[in-house]
Image: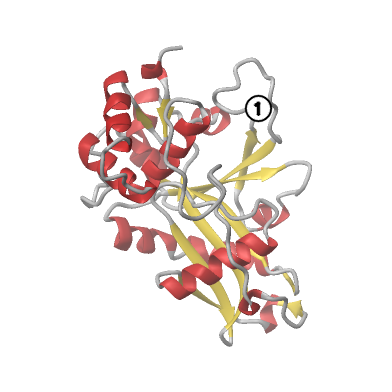
Amino acid sequence: MSVASYRYCGRNFTTAEFKIIDTIIRTPDHPVRAEISRRVCRELRWYRPNGQLKDMSCRVALLRMQRDGLISLPLPRNGNGNGNIRIKLNARSAPGSELSGRVDNYPFDIEIVDSTEQSRLWNEYIARYHYLGYTPLPGAQIRYMVKRDQKVLAVLGFGAAAWKMAPRDRWIGWTTAQRQYRLPFIANNSRFLILPWVRVKNLASAILGAIARRIVNDWQMRYHHPVCMLETLVEKKRFAGTSYRAANWLHLGSTQGRGKLDRAHRHPLPVKDIYVYPLTKDFRKVLSNEAD
């Protein structure tokens, strides 16, 4: 397979562009990874619809390129060099007192994570209690904290949609071109964590419902384009997807259990159920347009 055939974070990279990336990495001023990502975005004109650099998508793409042996990044200032970031845990994310009961007795507020302090706490909770641990969310993203009386009950995050999933793509009726242009109009709920000491019945589905009622406006405000559908992947052997079903998410099928580069089925991944939640009545019309 030629280098030009590789695709990362919804973008094709040509052989010439890999040479540009390599030149940026080898710049005499020895830029750190974050600066490399910004320079790559500018050189390759990789921008969001609001004109900002697609910096997070680029960082994820560069890490995957290195994993696939296509480039060699400098060692990170933080972390262990394999794309995972060490999160320093503090007392603020330590287990709290058990909460139990019904959701009716626990009215909650939802806050967007938009400060450094909130971001660090969100990262700590995910690193400490989520079975997947902490990794940066890919692409455009919004993270939320769910609180009651300023005590955190849950954290969740939405990032870039999966590039290709046959059951989802068939259900939408996508062509390859339509998917290429309209994938940013889907957000992936890649992290959802009810803190372990919070045992409030129906809280998860109530949170999903509340998020569905606000994320369209939140996404528009941050990225200047709408999001018209949510998706998530639920590991079949670990979870039953009960909360998503209770919140009226639709089950479309399952993943094949392999990565996009594992064509020989030598490195199986956990099979995951695919759930989606349309946010607008005309979501198929929006997703079927090939360009604005």
Instruction: Look at the image and tell me in which quarter the C terminus lies.
Output: top left
Q: Residue furthest front?
A: 28
Helix, strand or loop at label 1? It is: loop
From this view, report whether residue 221 is shown above or below residue 75: below
From this view, report whether residue 263 is shown above or below residue 137: above
Location of residue 243 in the rendering, given as x and y in whole percent from the top left corner: 68, 57
Q: What residue sits 35% from the left and 37% below the top?
A: 182
Query: Which residue in the protein does label 1 denote?
Result: 256
Q: What residue sits 31% from the left and 19% below the top?
A: 15
From this view, report whether residue 266 is shown above or below residue 117: above
Q: Is residue 143 left or right of residue 148?
A: left
Q: Is residue 212 left or right of residue 240?
A: left
Location of residue 163 in the rendering, given as x and y in whole percent from the top left corner: 47, 34
Q: What amino acid is at disc 1?
A: Gln
Q: Nearer the viewer, residue 222 or 114?
A: 114
Evaluate whether residue 172 shows in this view: no
Q: What residue sits 49% from the left and 54% below the top?
A: 158
Q: What residue sits 30% from the left and 63% below the top?
A: 221
Evaluate whether residue 82 shows in this view: yes
| Image mark count | 1
Location of residue 164 in the rendering, given as x and y in whole percent from the top left corner: 50, 30
From this view, report whether residue 158 is shown above or below residue 179: below
Q: Residue furthest top?
A: 1
| Rendered image quadrant of residue 71 | top left
